[in-house]
Amino acid sequence: MEYYNHNEPYSQKYLQDILNSVKTIAMVGASPDKTKFSYGVLRVLHETGYKMIPINPTPGLKEIRGLKVYPTLESVNQEIDMVEVFRSPKELIQIAKDAIKVNAKVLWGQIGVRNDEAARIAEEAGIKVVMDRCPKIELFRPFWKPKLNLSI
């Protein structure tokens, strides 16, 4: 298992290998609010071709963007490749433990979501970890080229 010093930048290969290998992403903290960052990330990843599973325990919330919402990771009745987290860093430890229970291959903390203890727990269980990054941004990063000759 590959352990990362999460104080150092992730290699482009590490991130690309993850994004190329996962098919099903459970998003913990998915929101039905179109103004929330999590909604936009869910939309782009879904439109890019990932099978998205929104996780949100709000009573009465049945679907987001036509996708069935589950209250917990453990209530999902299908394989989960990656758990993407839009929750506070302190919640990441329990989410790492839940990701282990559902046999996820990747635990990905969104921008601002970082917890070294959670990373250690997940990595010791053989789960790859990314923290404080956005998969939507990383997905398109290889195509970004600076255009320094443009006039302002």
Image (spheres, helix red, strand yellow):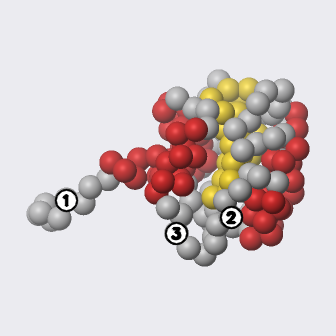
Q: Residue at x 53, y 46 (%)?
A: 17
Q: Residue at x 67, y 59 (%)?
A: 2
Q: Quadrant of residue 132?
A: bottom right
Residue 58 visible in the current orientation: no
Q: Nearer the viewer, mark 1 or mark 2?
A: 2
Q: Can you name the residue that lies furthest to the top here? A: 66
Q: Report the side of 12 relative to 142 (left or right).
A: right
Please state which of residues 90 and 65 is positioned toward the viewer in this rendering.
Answer: 90
Using the image, determine if residue 110 lies above or below residue 78. below
Q: Residue at x 87, y 53 (%)?
A: 97
> How many angstroms separate mark 1 from mark 3 (CA)?
24 Å
| Residue wearing tag 3 | 9
Label 3 secondary element: loop
Label 1 secondary element: loop
Using the image, determine if residue 151 lies above or below residue 16. below
Please state which of residues 88 and 145 is positioned toward the viewer in this rendering.
Answer: 145
Q: Position of residue 141 (x, y in %)?
A: 40, 52
Q: Earlier in the sequence, mark 3 or mark 2?
A: 2
Which corner quadrant holds the N terminus?
Answer: bottom right
Q: Quadrant of residue 121?
A: bottom right
Amino acid on which the number 2 mark rests in the picture: Tyr
Using the image, determine if residue 60 lies above or below residue 112. above
| Residue wearing tag 2 | 3
Residue 13 visible in the current orientation: yes
Q: Report the side of 117 relative to 64 (left or right).
A: right
| Residue wearing tag 1 | 147
> How many angstroms separate mark 3 from mark 2 (CA)?
13 Å
Q: Earlier in the sequence, mark 1 or mark 2?
A: 2
Q: Position of residue 38 (x, y in %)?
A: 61, 47
